[in-house]
Image (cartoon, coloured by chain):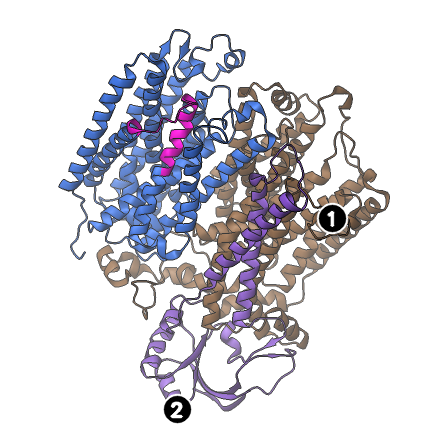
């Protein structure tokens, strides 16, 4: 640090007004104990039950996909007019959920929101699993899935035939695969030191081997930490625009077209806001369960839940602002096709999909407004309930955008019937839930769900027991304080 | 590989560690490294390490990605197989931006992580000498390399006076190996059990 | 710096500069008024009023962005900005003044520039037989314009004033953690109100009403968010500039390169964000290529005469911040930061210039002495009034509960 005295420790201080991030009387060792113990213990009954249900769902999904691949996507209730239905809705929904982890780690890091340390590891893991789920839908939507590699530009044997780099669908291929790769690297590079902690505590032979291999021989050397910090910071810097770009590009899938209700310039940032919104809701859903089951209430405190609820009300309102903007512009543009899409197909409660539009409005815009009240923000059960509502709402959003824009084609002869999914479409969706939760259960069992090293790093500034001892600093005169500690 | 001898001092508080590092360095000892359970800010400076230039590497990888993407797509669309897509020009820059951006990020991130692993010699199955198992838990472990002139007992005493809660002497092989983690290798032997 | 300079005093130099700039600006205004404003050529008149229009809106929005910055950092429980918080406060104190001027100019354009069958700038004012515009008059009509403009500026000023009052209140007595907490909650309430109102105005309706309606047929849902991004990044640059100035004069003893670094991050990040919105709006319209949408870009790209300004603005507002502000060292360097702040303010001023003027004068680039003259007038006023506001209260909110965090702030 330029200008700082090199050998002087920086004061560990934070205002007592702030809620502690780590409750209870903790020291470094206690943190290790609390977070790593669940990994070393036998999983609880609840874990087995949850895991079995997830695997069962996954197997049902696999069977549904098997039907789809064997008999073709005629197994689904898509038709010529509604060519994108549940599958692409689910794709966008899962990708959206897959935004919170990287957002928490990257953007909140840059905005220096200290509370992210408690939730980032699990959120990143969730991100990766959600992106895995999302990827299934476009891949199996292709129908002949064994030719899926055609989407990559490679020197092929079919003459100089290239993919169309102008197509937003191809941008998606690059965006999703890049996002998956970078999120994985970000998550895993953060995980390495914590895995080393598990390794060094390991008693059994298998665990020593397993975590020894996974932790890449991490020693905790100062030089390595220095590089690790630099790496995390740059990856965070890269992931920030990346996370924006991914949902932006997903929104381009719609917005570059000239379909009413899809072609609007606000789509990119509005999709991103929606993604953050649903992602945080999913993080709440998972973490409220995790903190209870793994006994981590002292690390994922009410303060954390409240902070995430604030993000939910913020992004929900941004999304609401975008909905109203769209609706307004549909009128303001005086474009009759836009007006039809918005005022006949969507905002009209009596139209075939009016219920979906108003359901979306209620779940995404109206209901999160309850989080303006501190009492409700800090109510765990209510938050859990709301997080589910939000995710239902965000599913409806994608469904509304996709289906209501295409079910009434320009020619009345190609107007489509009411579209409802087959059991195999639903099965596929449930299957991705199975995949998601199977992965998450495994993660929660075998990996530290909270970033151990990062919690240790903030302990002396934000730990409850340390904050209580800050009275002296808190009462010090500003001039003296600055004299003693300013760098 | 050569065997090296170390005197290892373990501290349980970073507030004790910092003055200790200063004292040890002032006394002229060479600190091999300090192993900590979490990144201790300012410790790299206290140890006199230089700044890492990993960012610069990341920037270069990124530029490489940008160039690859633009050159690749440009070549395909203008030289190899020009096509009229929606009446747009053969080199439709706005439409190429998303992929260019993605590849920039991808190259930069992958390149940096690989560089990081290479520099820190991190990989699966890598074996290293660990001076103390609690270095990843709650101890700050300082390893001082002994030269021919080092008086081990003096150094131990010195570390203890500087606040170390645990001091010992280890002989370790430098370098890194491939191997299985659970097999106990004879990489170091603890000559003196823990003092104090 | 050991001397305790808590109270800012407007230096003679600063006074001279601000009055000098205002003098130049008034001169330009008078000459412009005589040669263009009173000209018989309607086009010249439109250029004169258009120039006043975009300058007044630009400077109003960038000062208002300071209050937005204070409010969002308050909502996010930010601690790092406290040492220099009085600077954005002082900048936002200009909002009522610039607001009044903007109200005058906007209302004059709406009511005073109706020449027979058309208005020189806002075509919706007298729609004639244009069926599309006629249907838009539910939104674009003088009563709504007046009410919404007054409400927007009035509430920005009022809520901003409440925030500043609250901040000054804290100077009186020191607070223990409980009192501090209560004070923070009171801040949060007003900050939330301001932010919501900001979203309803700057984030949506106001830019449509004031700026987008100049191209009355054209529409873009992104427009307001784009305007917001542009004004916010400029607002950050303005804060940076004043912080650097005060620092150079030996004030703000607790603010150091750590804080400057974070301001620099904001400038960097929001430059990228602005570019992102720029690209999204441009690319989507370019890609789908519909005449009613591309009309906006015709004077600005390809064969348009505004092409140079349009792309230069992209270079200044995207490439320069991207390349120059990327490294840690440049964000901690006072000279580089001052240079970049000036560049960003200039770049986005030019952006506003093309947003308004390319629509008023599609065939001629109007960027010239009048633009710089009016800008000088505004810069002069900005320095003058911000200087006055800075001198009114202590520069450091010494009882702010997060001040100590801010003092030891570390990037």
Image quadrant assignment for residue A73: top right
Above or below, A167 against A101 in this view is: above
Split into 4 quadrants, where in the image is the N terminus of chain C? bottom left
Image quadrant assignment for residue B195: bottom left
Residue A278 shows up from this direction: no
Residue at 65 percent of width and 82 percent of height? B183
- Give percent across and percent down for residue B104: 55, 52
**Chain bearing mark 2:** B
Above or below, C352 against B195 in this view is: above
Foreground residue, C171 or C359? C359
User: Do the residues at pointers 2 and 1 share their chain?
Assistant: no
Q: Residue furthest right?
A: A71
Chain letter matching colour blue = C
Going by the image, does C94 lie left or right of A447?
A: left
Name the tint of chain A in the rendering: brown
* Residue that carries the numbered disc 1 in the rendered image: A150
Badge 1: residue crowd in 10 Å (few <14, some 14–19, many ≥20): few
Magenta stretch encompasses residue C108: no
- Give percent across and percent down for residue A108: 47, 50
Name the tint of chain B in the rendering: purple
Q: Nearer the viewer, mark 2 or mark 1?
A: 1
- Give percent across and percent down for residue A280: 56, 46
Split into 4 quadrants, where in the image is the C terminus of chain C? bottom left
* SS under mark 1: helix
Q: Which residues are magenta?
A: C347-371
Image quadrant assignment for residue C291: top right
Residue at 61 percent of width and 43 percent of height? A96
């Amino acid at each position: 640090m330029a200008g700082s005295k090199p050998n002087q420790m920086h004061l560990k201080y934070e205002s007592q007004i702030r809620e502690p991030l780590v409750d209870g009387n903790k020291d470094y060792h206690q943190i290790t104990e609390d977070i790593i113990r669940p990994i070393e213990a036998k999983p609880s009954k609840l874990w087995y039950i949850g895991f079995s249900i997830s695997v069962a769902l996954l197997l049902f999904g696999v069977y549904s996909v098997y039907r789809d691949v064997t008999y073709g996507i005629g197994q689904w209730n898509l038709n010529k007019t509604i060519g994108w239905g549940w599958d692409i809705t689910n794709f966008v929904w899962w990708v959206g959920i897959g935004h919170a982890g990287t957002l928490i780690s990257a953007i909140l890091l840059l905005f220096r929101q200290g509370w992210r340390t408690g939730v980032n590891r699990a959120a990143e893991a969730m991100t990766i699993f959600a992106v895995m789920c999302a990827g299934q839908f476009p891949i199996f939507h292709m129908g002949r899935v064994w030719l899926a590699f055609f989407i990559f530009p490679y020197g092929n044997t079919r003459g100089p035939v290239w993919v169309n780099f102008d197509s937003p669908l191809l941008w998606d291929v690059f965006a999703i695969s890049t996002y998956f790769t970078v999120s994985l690297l970000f998550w895993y590079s953060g995980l390495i030191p914590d895995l080393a902690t598990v390794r060094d505590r390991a008693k059994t032979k298998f665990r020593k081997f397993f975590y020894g291999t996974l932790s890449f021989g991490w020693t905790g050397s100062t030089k390595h930490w220095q590089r690790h910090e630099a790496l995390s910071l740059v990856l965070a810097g890269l992931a920030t625009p990346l996370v924006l770009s991914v949902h932006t590009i997903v929104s381009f899938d719609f917005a570059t077209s000239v379909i009413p209700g899809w072609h609007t310039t606000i789509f990119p940032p509005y999709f991103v806001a929606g993604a953050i919104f649903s992602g945080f809701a999913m993080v709440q859903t998972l973490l409220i369960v995790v903190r209870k089951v793994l006994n981590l209430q002292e690390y994922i405190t009410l303060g954390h839940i409240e902070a995430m609820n604030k993000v939910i009300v913020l992004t929900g309102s941004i999304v609401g602002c975008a909905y109203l903007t769209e609706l307004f512009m549909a009128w303001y543009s005086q474009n009759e096709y836009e007006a039809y899409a918005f005022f006949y197909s969507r905002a009209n409660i009596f139209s075939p999909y009016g219920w979906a539009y108003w359901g979306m409005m209620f779940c995404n815009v109206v209901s999160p407004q309850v989080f303006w009240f501190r009492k409700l923000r800090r109510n765990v059960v209510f938050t859990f309930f709301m997080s589910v509502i939000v995710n239902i709402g965000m599913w409806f959003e994608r469904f509304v955008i996709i289906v209501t824009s295409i079910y009434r084609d320009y020619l009345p002869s190609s107007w489509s019937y009411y579209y409802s999914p087959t059991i195999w479409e639903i099965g596929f969706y449930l299957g991705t839930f199975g995949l998601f939760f199977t992965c998450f259960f495994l993660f929660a069992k075998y990996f530290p769900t909270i970033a151990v090293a990062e919690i240790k790093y903030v302990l002396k500034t934000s730990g409850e027991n340390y904050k209580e001892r800050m009275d002296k600093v808190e009462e010090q005169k500003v001039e003296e304080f600055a004299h003693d500690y300013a760098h | 590989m050569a065997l090296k001898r170390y005197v290892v001092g373990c501290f349980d508080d970073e507030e004790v560690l910092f003055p200790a590092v200063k004292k040890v360095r002032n006394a002229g000892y060479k600190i091999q490294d300090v192993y900590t359970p979490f990144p201790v800010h300012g410790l790299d400076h206290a140890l006199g390490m230089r700044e890492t230039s990993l960012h610069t590497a990341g920037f270069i990888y990124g530029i490489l990605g940008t160039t690859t993407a633009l050159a690749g797509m440009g070549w395909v669309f203008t030289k190899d197989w020009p096509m009229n897509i929606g009446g747009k020009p053969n080199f439709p820059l706005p439409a190429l931006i998303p992929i260019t951006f993605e590849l920039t990020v991808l190259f930069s991130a992958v390149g940096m992580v690989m560089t990081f692993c290479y520099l820190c010699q991190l990989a699966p199955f890598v074996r290293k000498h660990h001076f103390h198992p609690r270095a990843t838990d709650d101890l700050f472990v300082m390893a001082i390399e002994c030269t021919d002139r080092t008086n081990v007992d003096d150094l131990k005493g010195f570390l203890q006076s500087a606040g170390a809660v645990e001091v010992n002497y280890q002989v370790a092989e430098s370098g890194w190996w491939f191997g299985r983690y659970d097999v106990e290798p004879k990489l170091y032997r603890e000559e003196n059990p823990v003092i104090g | 710096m050991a001397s305790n300079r808590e109270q800012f005093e407007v230096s003679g130099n600063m006074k001279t500069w601000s009055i000098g700039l205002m003098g130049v600006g008034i001169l330009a205004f008078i000459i412009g008024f005589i040669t263009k404003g009173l000209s018989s050529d309607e086009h010249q008149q439109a250029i004169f009023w258009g120039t006043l229009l975009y300058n007044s809106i630009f400077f109003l929005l960038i000062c208002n962005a300071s209050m937005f910055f204070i409010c969002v950092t308050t909502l996010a429980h930010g601690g790092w900005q406290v040492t220099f918080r009085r600077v954005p406060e002082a900048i936002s104190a200009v909002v009522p003044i610039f607001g009044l001027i903007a109200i005058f100019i906007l209302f004059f354009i709406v009511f005073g520039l109706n020449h027979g069958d058309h208005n020189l700038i806002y075509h919706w004012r007298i729609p004639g037989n244009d069926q599309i515009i006629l249907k838009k008059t539910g939104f674009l009509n003088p009563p709504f314009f007046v009410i919404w403009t007054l409400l927007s500026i009035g509430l920005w000023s009022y809520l901003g004033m409440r925030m500043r009052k609250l901040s000054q209140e804290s100077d009186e007595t020191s607070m223990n953690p409980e009192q501090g907490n209560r004070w923070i909650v009171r801040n949060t309430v007003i900050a939330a109100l301001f932010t919501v109102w900001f979203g309803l105005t700057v984030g949506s309706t106001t830019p449509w009403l004031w700026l987008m309606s100049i191209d009355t047929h054209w529409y873009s849902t992104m427009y307001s968010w784009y305007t917001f991004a542009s004004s916010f990044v400029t607002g950050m640059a303005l804060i940076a500039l004043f912080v650097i100035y005060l620092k150079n004069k030996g004030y703000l003893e607790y603010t150091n390169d750590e804080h400057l670094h974070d301001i620099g991050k904001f400038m960097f990040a929001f430059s990228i964000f602005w570019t992102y919105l720029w690209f999204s709006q441009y690319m989507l319209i370019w890609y789908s290529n519909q005449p009613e949408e591309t009309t906006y870009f015709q004077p600005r790209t390809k064969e348009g005469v505004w092409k140079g300004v349009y792309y230069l603005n992209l270079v200044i507002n995207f490439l320069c911040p991207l390349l120059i502000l990327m490294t840690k060292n440049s964000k901690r360097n006072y000279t580089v930061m001052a240079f970049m702040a000036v560049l960003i303010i200039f770049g986005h001023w030019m952006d506003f210039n093309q947003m308004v003027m390319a629509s008023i004068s599609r065939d001629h680039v109007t960027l010239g002495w009048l633009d710089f003259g009016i800008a000088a007038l505004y810069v002069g006023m900005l320095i003058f009034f911000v200087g006055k506001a800075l001198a009114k209260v202590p520069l450091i909110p010494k009882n702010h509960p997060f001040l100590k965090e801010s003092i030891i702030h570390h990037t």
